[in-house]
Amino acid sequence: MERPKRSKPKVFDPQYITHCLDVEGAVSHPLRLTVAELATMSLTEVRDLTMICGSGRNEGFIASYRGVLLTDVLNRADVLMREHDSPNYMYVTVSSSDGHWAVFSYQELFNTSVGEQAIVIIEKDGQPLGDQEGMIAFISANDKRPGPRKLRYLKRVEVHEHFWGKGLE
């Protein structure tokens, strides 16, 4: 099947491999987590995942991914809450060194089933990730179509706060 005209090509190149994950933005404790540090955190496993791309095309089957919940990473960084309604104005971006990224609302991660399987991946099928995905990757496994929010070469997590009508602050 031909790729949609506006989709980015997949890039597999050792130059994109990341060895640490930076957590920045509206957090009390910015982090730089190595694969070894991620491995010491509580690990979550996703099994028997069918990868469906944004168009609905089946992209294959993953027996197992293991990693750290994105919410656990955010809790370790301690997201800044400036006021009671701050969670309603917050969003999180995850981005990779090959130029791909995904967006989540704070509420989506912490108050829906999406957050229960939004995972910073460090293992696939019981082995460390290979060059095709880098040392650190990401999946939003509870999405109906997880492909669009599956990132290889994960590099950064950023927390943002936006006040509607007031612009970015």
Image (spheres, rainbow, N blue to C red):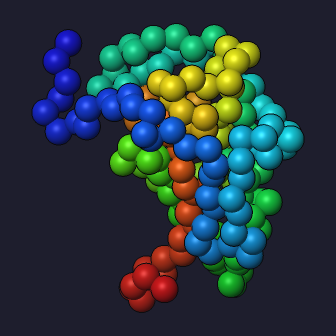
Quarter placement of the N terminus: top left
Q: Quadrant of residue 14?
A: top left
Which residue: 54% across, 50% down? Answer: 155
- The number of discs equals 0
Relative image position of residue 148 (x, y in whole percent): 40, 35
Q: Please tell me which residue lies in front, 146 or 23.
A: 23
Q: Please tell me which residue lies in front, 56 or 131.
A: 131
Which residue: 60% across, 38% down? Answer: 136
Relative image position of residue 66 (x, y in whole percent): 72, 27
Residue 81 in the image: above or below residue 130: below
Q: Please tell me which residue lies in front, 58 or 62.
A: 62
Residue 104 visible in rendering:
no
Residue 104 in the image: above or below residue 81: above
Residue with the most extreme left position: 5
Left or right position of 65 against 57:
right
Which residue: 78% across, 41% down? Answer: 36
Residue with the most extreme bottom position: 166
Relative image position of residue 92 (x, y in whole percent): 55, 59
Relative image position of residue 57 (x, y in whole percent): 33, 17
Residue with the most extreme front position: 15
Left or right position of 37 against 63:
right
Q: Please tell me which residue lies in front, 112 or 135.
A: 135
Which residue: 48% across, 77% down? Answer: 162
Residue 95 visible in rendering:
yes
Q: Quadrant of residue 157?
A: bottom right
